[in-house]
Amino acid sequence: MGILRSMAAGFAGACVLTMAHETARRLFSDAPRMDILGMRAISKTMEKLGEEPPQEDELHTWALGGDIVSNGIFYSFVGTGEDALWKGALLGAAAGAGAIYLPGPMGLGEMPSNRTPVTQAMTVGLYLLGGLTAGTVGHLLAKR
């Protein structure tokens, strides 16, 4: 039962993160564009496998789904219990830093998450929000 609660917490954090990213990109010009990084990652992988990536709308949907799955698994490491909130904060901050510094070396480009200082701050803040959400849900689920 603990694994299911941890996964529920992780996916709650991932859903909040994805909704916040999608909202921010529609409202703020400096918002991080993690959807673009996801689309690039999917396209490059498919091309290396000799496959044709889908059209942009479908590719965007795939990227959002991939974000939810990968971030959900990552955030599930918050677990449950008294320390879930602290773990969520640490995981969120680490994910935000990784989202800024890893895309360039991975060949996905730096602009979507590292464009301006505001973009960088929003990137860390959004991932921190996801981690804190996961930690809060993990903490609350432990009390049940």
Image: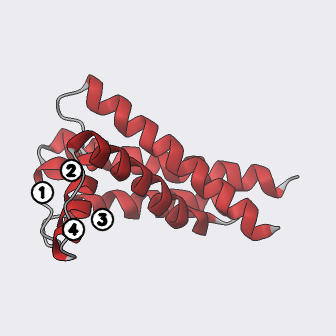
Mark 1 sits on what residue?
A: 110
User: Gap between marks 1 and 4, in whole Å?
Assistant: 25 Å
**Lower sequence index among marks 3 and 2:** 3
Residue 81 shows in this picture = no
The amino acid marked with disc number 1 is Glu
Q: From the image, tell me which residue sits under label 3.
A: 98
Residue identifier under label 2:
113
Q: Nearer the viewer, residue 51 or 5?
A: 51
Q: How many marks?
A: 4
* Mark 4 vs 2: CB contact within 8 A: no
Q: Residue at x 17, y 66 (%)?
A: 44
Nearest to N terminus: mark 3 or mark 1: 3
C-beta proximity under 8 Å, tags 1 and 2: yes
Q: CB under 8 Å between callouts 1 and 4? A: no
- Residue 90 locus on image (x, y percent): 48, 63
Determine whether 36 is above or below 43 in the image. above
The secondary element bearing badge 1 is classed as loop
Residue positioned 11% across, 50% down in the render: 111
